[in-house]
Image: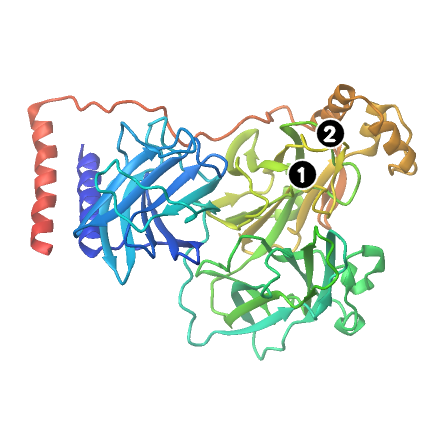
Amino acid sequence: MARIQVNIFSAILCICFVKALKTIDEKHEVVLNVEHGVNLKWRVDGEDILFEMSAVTRGYVAIGFSPNGGMPGSDIVVGWVNNGKAFVSDRYAYDFKKPEADSSQDYELLYGYEENGKTTIGFTRKLHTCDPKDYTITGDTSRIIWAINDNDPDKPDDLQYHRTARGVRSVVILDSTFKLRELPEDGKYFDMLMPNVSVPNDDTTYWCSPFLVPKFDKPVQVFRFDTIVQKGHEDLVHHMIIYGCTGDYDSVSHWADLCIRKNMPPDLGKCVRVIYAWAVGAGAFEFPEHVGLSLGGPNDPTFMYIEMHYDNPERRSDFVDNSGLRLHYIPARREYDLDVWMVGEAFETKAHMIPPKETSFKTFGYCSGECTQASMKEDVKVFAVFLHGHLALRQINLQQYRNGTLISEVRDDNYDFNLQETRNTPEIIYKPGDDFVVTCSYDTMDRENITFGGIGTHEEMCLAFIYYYPRRANLTFCISNPTWESISDEFGINTNNGTLIVSNITDITDLDGKELKDSLKEVAYHGARYEFCGFVSHGVREFPPKWFKDDRRIIKHEACAMTVFSGSSKTMGTLTATVLLAAFVISILF
């Protein structure tokens, strides 16, 4: 009972402070549209989420949570200020027409005001309202639609058509990157920018350029990465991965070319330590205040290289690019040095295969407990995860298992190729001996042939880049793919020294649709897998383990039910007294 009193008291105080100060004290912020100044801010508070939406308009502003980026099926909230009084309305769009008022009004107005031609509305709701017409806010990528109008409704139900002042943007609501902190006074930075690369007129190009790490008098720690995309190249620059190296920079300093391993200088080809990963739609990324990326120490990279993915579907030949990254650093004073661990399906072979004309074909990247026992040695703490795939990917999740029990997961069941953002997570403890599975689900209904794993936009990946601390020397990557033996056994073909030759691929692709799907599913779900465990070990692992089920998940929301207070009048009286006490405190403060 005491806990209920405290929770009610805290909730009432929180809401009243927000209403009085007219700010939600946001932790996250995104610009939905620059032209109309449409901004969205938010902060999660337990099972509640507080929003502030604003736009350059003296009429209404609206946002909606859409299942697919369109209007039908969207959960919409509309807000406006009329004669100094703010309004908010919870609505649902059945079709491409004016959304109807929801019978259950689950959005609560916190504040609203007009200032300098801009309308600002603060409101709150539950993450999970139990209303079937309300969007359940999870860690999935959300499609946020927005609209504005220069006129207020004369009546709550009299919304005017927004015309062209509308749009959509994908946003990660939960586990989103935090609002950036102010840069410290002793902070410095250095840039790593592509050296005026003449981008080839191919639809997909991976370009590698090395960069010398500056000389430091004493070790430093990188605490933030800013993305620098050359103006006009926003659709060209798709993603970047930074690798750390400890070889001889002089041997690579004059080389910059296509990222083809056999053509790379030996000291560059040895660089496998992932430092940072960024992809289209994401912004700057800042590490928690107790961790940093160490540079200038005895075991730190002496140089790095950027693997840049250019997406050039029009095959233009006039792009000259100097995009890249800015690394902010401070003198080493943070408690822990971080690192990045890559887990998932090996993509540089033809063993990752997805049949055409499928709506939800799954593949898996398995990292065994044997690998983590050898490479992790001691516990690590995870604070962020970057999930990555290409155009056909629809769902991806990283799951951690301990003795066959699902411990944690980071998942996105609404993946968007054009928004790939590093996700902050509550700190998760990974232990030596834990197993990990990255599961990817693909939609290939628009394809006529097999989709193979690879670096191209129309090829596929299934990877998780895991940010952890403290740094472990051997915890660098753990990737796997079906063995060639399992493929040859299933399809009845021969391999050539463990590789899939062109004639084998023709034999596979000539199969009819059902036979191809069934055979590839058998390989993906039940074939032995070859595991590459960093520089520690590699070998064949049986998959799946007996405890694994591909549809297992952690359910975060309990079944909706009406909460009933029962008991004596004394109990109900105590609750009433709690509410009155909160009101009394608020009256004194404000």
* 404 is higher (above) or lower (below) than 378: above
- Residue placed at 68% from the left, 33% from the top? 446
- Give the residue displayed 53% in from the left and 50% down from the top: 421
Q: Quadrant of residue 225?
A: bottom right
The residue lying furthest to the bottom in this view is 217
How many numbered badges does the structure rendering display?
2
Q: Is residue 188 above or below residue 406?
A: below
- Report the quarter where the N terminus lies: top left
Query: Which amino acid, by three-letter code, is at mark 1?
Result: Glu
Residue ID for mark 1: 370
Residue 109 appearing in the image: yes
Secondary structure state at the residue bearing disc 1: helix
Q: Are marks 1 and 2 in contact (CB under 8 Å)?
A: no
Foreground residue, 78 or 353? 78
Q: Is residue 436 visible?
A: no
Q: Estimate the x, y position of residue 301 in percent, counting from the top left.
A: 66, 66
